[in-house]
Image (cartoon, grey):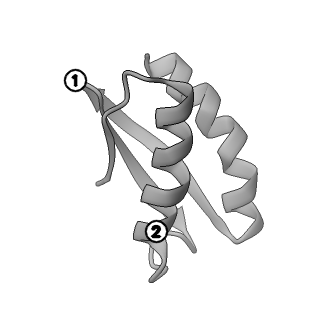
């Protein structure tokens, strides 16, 4: 599943990078995906919205085994 998540993140990454940010996969544990938002995304007040409404929504739609996405 980790490889599938990395592939989806590669598709999401250009959008984040366009705003000066990035996302790094930290790990996967029983359907819980742990990511680190970097750059402008790391300190952005909208980071939680990006995480839940963007990254989590896309990952869940593409990989049904994903239960949630958490920022670490």
Residue in the image at 45% along x and 78% along y: 43
Residue under pointer 1: 30
Q: Quadrant of residue 6?
A: top right
Q: Is residue 51 above or below residue 57?
A: below
Q: Secondary structure at mark 1?
A: loop
The mark found on residue 49 in the picture is 2
Please tell me which of labels 2 and 1 falls first in the chain. Answer: 1
Q: Residue 45's spot in the image, x, y percent?
A: 44, 83
Q: From the viewer's perspective, is 68 left or right of 30?
A: right
Q: Is residue 63 above or below residue 17?
A: above
Residue 40 image offset from top left, x and y in percent: 57, 74
Q: Are marks 2 and 1 in contact (CB under 8 Å)?
A: no
Task: Say which quadrant the C terminus sits in.
Answer: bottom left
* Secondary element at image label 2: helix
Seen from the viewer's position, the closer of residues 59 and 9 is 59
> What residue do we see at 77% from left, 65% from top?
18
- Residue 58's label in the rendered image is none
Question: Residue 2 occupies which quadrant of the picture?
Answer: top left
Identify the residue at image location x=37%, y=29%: 66
Left or right: 28 as drawn, with respect to 50:
left
Residue at 37% in and 21% down: 65
The 10 Å Cα crowd at callout 1, few under 14, some 14 to 19, many 20 or more, is few
Residue closest to the far bottom: 45
Horizontal and vertical percent position of residue 14: 75, 52
Vertical comparison of 23 with 43: above or below: above
């Amino acid at each position: 599943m980790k490889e599938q998540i990395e592939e989806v993140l590669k598709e999401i990454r250009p959008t984040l990078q366009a705003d000066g940010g990035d996302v790094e996969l930290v790990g996967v544990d029983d359907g819980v995906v742990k990511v680190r938002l970097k750059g402008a995304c790391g300190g952005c007040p909208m980071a939680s919205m990006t995480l839940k409404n963007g990254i989590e929504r896309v990952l869940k739609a593409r990989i049904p085994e994903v239960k949630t996405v958490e920022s670490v």
